[in-house]
Amino acid sequence: MAIVINGAEYPLPDDPRVSLLDLLRERLGLTGTKLGCNQGGCGACTVIVDGARVLSCLTLAVQADGREVRTIEGLAAENGGLHPLQQAFIDHEGFQCGYCTPGQICSAVAMVAELRRGDPSYVTVDLAEGLKEPTRQELRERMSGNLCRCGAHNGIVDAIEEMLIGGTA
């Protein structure tokens, strides 16, 4: 039993009660993923599991057995360069204190993949017609599980729009 985290294989913890968040932060030292509310309400702990957004505080590490986990540390390019969305967050001031930023970026990367697959959201107008150009309302709805207490949501949406236009996610 093992989990692939950012391309490296790790054994599952012996204790099946260990959350994915605790495995990442406390046992593997991957502290980019943040502990926020620890109740699944803020999204600060969001990571990507098999391409989908997951709240690591509500996920047991054993649930990730045999799956691929990407954290904020795993988004950078192999040469160490920033992921395009990380750069877009900087360019659009999509952060202030930065605490929620890793979860916001992981969520946005997976959300862009949802958009490209044509997955509908709560505000998708016509499910039969599918999603054409995502509006700011669509982006805000899809990112609503990630809270920024500093109020950088406009910069975050601007950064996501830039990434969608550039198609580099």
Image (cartoon, helix red, strand yellow):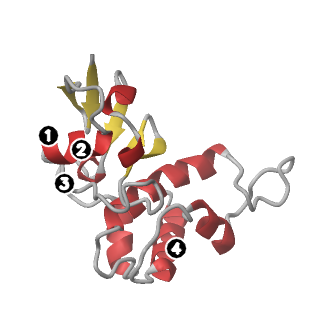
Secondary structure of the residue carrying tag 2 is helix
Front residue (pair 45, 129): 45
Q: Residue 20: where, in percent of width, then height? A: 31, 39
Q: Please say if the residues under marks 2 and 1 sit with CB atoms less than 8 Å apart.
A: yes
Secondary structure of the residue carrying tag 4 is helix
* Quarter in which the C terminus is drawn: bottom left
Q: Residue 125: where, in percent of width, then height? A: 82, 60
Instruction: Tell me which residue sits at (64%, 73%) in the image.
Output: 136
Front residue (pair 156, 145): 145
Residue type at mark 2? Asp
Q: Residue 105: where, in percent of width, then height? A: 39, 61
* Quarter in which the N terminus is drawn: top left
Q: Which residue is mark 2?
A: 22
In this view, 126 is above or below 135: above
Residue type at mark 3? Thr
Q: Mark 2 or 4, which is nearer the eye?
A: 2
- Can you tell which quarter of the image residue 66 is in? top left
Q: Mark 4 or 1, which is nearer the eye?
A: 1
Secondary structure of the residue carrying tag 3 is loop
Q: Which residue is mark 4?
A: 157
The CA span between labels 4 and 1 is 33 Å
